[in-house]
Image (tube, grey):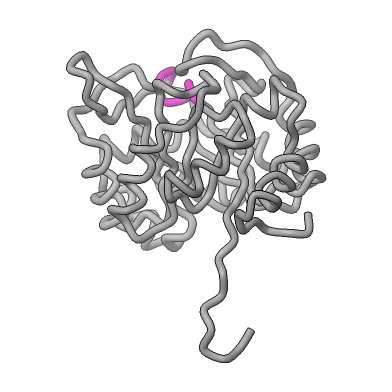
């Protein structure tokens, strides 16, 4: 690369593991969950296939008042080399510290960030913005408008997703994980309009999540959704697609991805 030339940033491919009581689950629109395996075993498979990062989300932790997943994180971190983002039940700086000490590289907060936005700034000040991921679950309300929802998509907050994304970035978030509850698990593609609106409104990385059913959906999330990274779960659980196949497809489609695996 010549002096002064701007490096091309590679798009990231991130499998998502949704956890409930220590087991891996997958559902549709945050409901109808079914067990899909052991998180540690699956994480090692994704690591071997060249996933750029891995996201663990204990989706019922806030709703059920459970704590963080430090034990699972520690087991995964011991045998995997990809960066780990972990969320679910995180309410305090101590929860951040516990997960980072267990081996997480980033910590995701959702419900706690909405209920006490100052936690974003506090965590960024102590651990650095790069460790703070604000997860935003957007769901259409009775009027058909997208609204931020907490407690695994069960409680509307009155917040407009793009406005909340901008505020989270202002408070010190280093990254945003944007999930469309209406698209999640349906395997019909991302909410591209939502992802694009958020990506164009903030200057921090945006990860698209919720709805991937084909490899083309991943490309759409990066191209049309303007995301910095694409996250997915169902396509890897319920089809014959893999991280290797997904990266190969994206590379052949002209999308910049981290290569070789």
Q: Main secondary structure of the magenta part?
A: helix
The C terminus: image quadrant: bottom right
Res. 160 image quadrant? top left
| Residue located at (38% from left, 36% from top) | 110
Q: Which residues are magenta?
A: 59-64
Q: Position of residue 41 (x, y in %)?
A: 79, 31
| Residue located at (21% from left, 44% from top) | 163
| Residue located at (62% from left, 30% from top) | 214
Q: Is residue 233 magenta?
A: no
- Depicted 100 relative to depicted 157: above or below: below
Res. 255 image quadrant? bottom right
158 displayed left or right of 83 = left
Res. 235 image quadrant? top right
Q: Position of residue 200 (x, y in %)?
A: 32, 53
Task: Say which of 222 and 108 sits in front.
Answer: 222
| Residue located at (25% from left, 22% from top) | 156
Q: Is residue 75 visible?
A: no
19 displayed left or right of 243 = left
- The total of numbered circles placed on residues is 0
Task: Say which of 196 and 19 sits in front.
Answer: 196
Extreme residue toward the front, this view: 253
95 displayed left or right of 10 = left
Task: Say which of 162 and 252 sits in front.
Answer: 252
Q: Position of residue 21 (x, y in %)?
A: 60, 19
Q: Position of residue 48 (x, y in %)?
A: 82, 45
- Depicted 216 relative to depicted 227: above or below: above
Q: Is residue 60 magenta?
A: yes
Task: Say which of 157 and 211 sits in front.
Answer: 211
The N terminus: image quadrant: bottom right
């Amino acid at each position: 690369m010549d002096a002064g030339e701007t490096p091309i940033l590679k798009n990231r491919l991130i499998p998502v593991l949704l956890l409930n009581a220590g087991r891996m689950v997958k559902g549709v629109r945050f409901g109808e969950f079914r067990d899909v395996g052991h998180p540690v075993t699956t994480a090692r498979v994704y690591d071997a296939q060249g996933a750029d990062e891995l996201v663990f989300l204990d989706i019922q932790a806030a709703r059920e008042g459970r704590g963080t997943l430090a034990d699972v994180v520690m087991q995964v971190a011991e045998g995997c080399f990809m960066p780990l983002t972990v969320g679910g039940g995180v309410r305090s700086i101590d929860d951040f510290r516990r997960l980072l000490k267990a081996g997480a590289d980033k910590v995701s907060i959702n419900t706690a960030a909405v209920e006490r936005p100052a936690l974003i700034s506090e965590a960024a000040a102590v651990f650095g913005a790069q460790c703070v991921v604000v997860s935003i679950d957007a769901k259409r309300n009775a009027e058909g408008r997208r609204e931020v929802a907490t407690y695994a998509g069960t409680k509307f907050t009155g917040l407009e997703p793009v406005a909340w994304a901008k505020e989270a970035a202002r408070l010190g978030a280093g990254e945003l994980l944007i999930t469309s509850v209406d698209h999640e698990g349906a395997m019909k593609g991302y909410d591209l309009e939502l992802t694009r609106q958020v990506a164009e409104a903030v200057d921090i990385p945006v990860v698209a999540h919720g709805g991937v059913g084909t490899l083309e959906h991943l490309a759409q999330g990066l191209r049309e959704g303007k995301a910095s990274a694409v996250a997915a779960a169902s396509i890897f659980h319920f089809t014959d697609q893999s991280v290797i196949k997904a990266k190969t497809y994206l590379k052949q489609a002209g999308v910049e991805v981290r290569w070789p695996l």
